[in-house]
Amino acid sequence: MQIDEVRRHEGRFAMEGTALAERLQEKVAGVCLIAGALLLAPATQFEYSGGLFWAGVFGLVSHILFVPGLLGIARLLRQPSPRLSVVAGLLVAAGCVGGASFQVAMLHEWAALMAGTPESMMAAIMEVTEGRVFPVLVIFGIQFPIALLTLSVGLFRTSTAPTWVAALLGIAVILWPIGHIGSIQLVQHLAEVILLVPLVWLGLRFLRGVPQVVAVPAST
């Protein structure tokens, strides 16, 4: 009897520990989603105003914050769509690493300028970078909007979030590569503003507490 009682207590403590860990993960995801989304606009503004250092710093921190934040959204899909949740998590990890690498490239460019690198050498470095480095980074960086698109589709299919949240996320995903690949500041800011709304909504939802979504089979 005592052994059974000990096992029951151990099981209860394990469940409470798991619930606490999941709640903390939700809070971290909520804070990271909101903070990461808010840092996107100033990063873009600094990039086009010549502040490469702060553009790189804000952009790097934003993509770091998006890792736990977007993985939190992927966890929402874990029960209603486990396969989609796993795929989205992989895309989030690869996309955030790729996006962060672009921000680090800005920091290196700023450092070279501050070191007084001659213009001819800077031009040669940028030529090599654009020809050999950026294509590699694009392969991983493009997975960031693909990850957002996957999350948008997942939220819509599982009704885990309101339709307008998934729709805004999808619209932002369409504008994101157009603005970044075409280097169009207005489009980048528009994508960031549209993306801010669903991410802040989801972040606040995480902070308030997210009810677990359980798929219920249709009655026969």
Image (cartoon, rainbow, N blue to C red):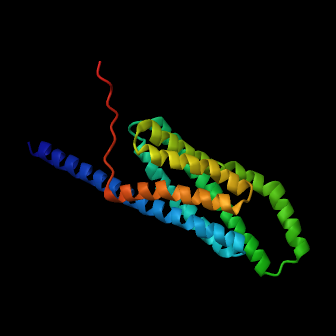
Q: Residue at x 38, y 59 (%)?
A: 204
Q: Nearer the viewer, residue 129 or 10?
A: 129
- Looking at the figure, which quarter contains the N terminus? top left
Q: How many marks?
A: 0
- Looking at the figure, which quarter contains the C terminus? top left
Q: On the image, which quarter does residue 205 sit in?
A: bottom left
Residue 140 appears in the picture as rendered:
yes
Q: Is residue 168 left or right of residue 217?
A: right
Q: Nearer the viewer, residue 49 or 22?
A: 49
Q: Residue at x 77, y 52 (%)?
A: 135
Eyeballing the image, is 53 above or below 203?
A: below
Residue farthest to the top? 220
Eyeballing the image, is 132 above or below 213?
A: below
Eyeballing the image, is 103 above or below 176?
A: below
Q: Give percent across and percent down for residue 19.
A: 29, 52
Residue farthest to the right? 120
Q: Residue at x 37, y 60 (%)?
A: 27
Residue 141 appears in the picture as rendered:
no
Q: Give percent across and percent down for residue 139.
A: 70, 48
Q: Is residue 166 left or right of residue 19?
A: right
Q: Give percent across and percent down for residue 169.
A: 53, 49
Residue farthest to the left? 1
Q: On the image, which quarter does residue 109 sit in?
A: bottom right
